Amino acid sequence: MIGAFAESVLPGNVDTTDTELALVAAARNGDLDAFGTLFEQHKDPVYRFVLRSVSSREDAEDIVQESFCRAWASIDRFRGEARFSTWVYRIAAGVCADRARLAKRRGRLVVEVPLEAEEIAVGMAAREGRQTSVTRQAIARAMAELPLAHRQLVVLCDVQGFTSGEAAEILGCSAVSVRVRLCRAHAKLRQALSRDGEVT
Amino acid sequence: MRPICFLISWRLAGRPVTEHATPWVARHLAGCERCRAEAESIARLTAAIRQSIPDQGKCPVTWHEVLSRISARRRRDPASVRARIPAGAAVCAVVAIVLVVALLGPHRDAARPGSAPASVHTVAPRLEDLQPAPKPAAVVVGAPNLPDSASMRPRSAQPAAGSSGRPHKPGPHAYIAAPPKPVLAEAHALDSAVPGDGQGVEANAGPVAQVPPMISEEAGRRAADVLIGLSEQMTEEKSAEIQKRLTDVLVSAMPG
């Protein structure tokens, strides 16, 4: 079910090891090099999460920078109760929400649909034996129509493999709320894709 | 459709990861056509989402860029100060300072013995003006409007307001139109004037001069000491303590 790409970003593969705890402790004592190592370890999954939330590379890069800046500024408040990755994800989700609010206030479209015409084939094992294909554009459009919180949930749970509990911790809500929202997000996605003529 | 079907789609949406949940979900899926179709639909959807996302997900942001931003922010906004003073504590401190200034400010002059009332404008005399004046002049009491430019000039021959023949009714709204540059003797006369001495300066005893200060300078100084002492180690926990101590100091200084 989960492909090589998804496995590479699964947070479960990045356990809070002694090394990471040592790096966090050093960073809390003001060691910027240690924080730099943490940044290198976590920047890719955080970037993917942010990129799928805002769908603009420039915004995503800026949000990643801002997230790690905020993480450094408040590293002394990280008590180690959650994983470092979860904590940084939470900061990044907050920055995304801030940007979305700002963009909404300025009347700017938050999500830009990436225009990639390339089609990929998915859902090879349809019950009727019929091959279904979904374009990237259709998915991107459907994702763009979701509210930010739903979009972030889909990315966290369906793409990056976080459990509902972890997603709840990142987004600051309950696990029940995560499941309810995810159900609604799936329903909306299927509705949007079927409206676009894509069969899922 | 049984109630458990709702639980299944809910479970699938939440990605059942706990070991004990999987067997009953699998058992139900094996026996329920509808839920099996739902599960396959969700699986196809999530696979489509996962694969639709570009694989080139390497973050182009370098550590150097983040470091530059951290440094720039540090220069612009020193972390040592900002990290220690949370917004709530800072607001609390500002409110306290404003409170102290507002309570002390208007009464500072009145509280000082022998000082001129705030309603009297005295201008520092020039050297050539330091001549003995024949008599205090240009002190107009009860005038409805400001004196014209002629009356503002020192006029030794001009009769005093009290003897000008105009009805003299000192009341709460009486005010003093002092000359712009009173000579030394005038200033001295104003300073040493006793209210009600018949020299036309009884309006000096205006409402401002008679109101006692709400808190003394000593109390203000103590409040300031509290502020300064705590600002060094102001944290979120200290915020409440600051508020309480300031309130105690200010309340204890209130008369009555």
Image (cartoon, helix red, strand yellow):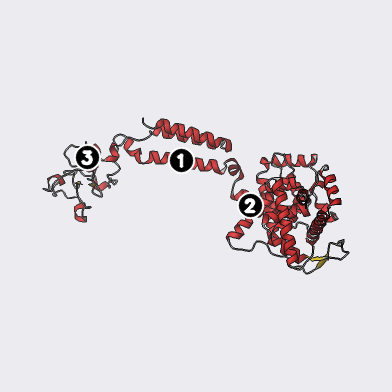
Can the viewer see residue A179 in this picture?
yes
Residue of label 1: B97
Report the residue at 86% width, 51% height from top. Answer: B30
Of B148 and A5, the residue lying toward us: A5
Of B99 and B186, the residue lying toward us: B99
Residue at mark 1 to residue at mark 3: CA–CA distance = 37 Å
Residue of label 2: B72
Residue of label 3: B189
Residue B135 x/y as whole percent: 16, 43
Residue B57 x/y as whole percent: 78, 58
Can the viewer see residue B64 in this picture?
no
What's under tag 1, amino acid-wise? Ile
**Contact flag, marks 2 and 3 (Cβ < 8 Å):** no
SS type, badge 1: helix
Residue at mark 2 to residue at mark 3: CA–CA distance = 61 Å
Residue A193 x/y as whole percent: 75, 64
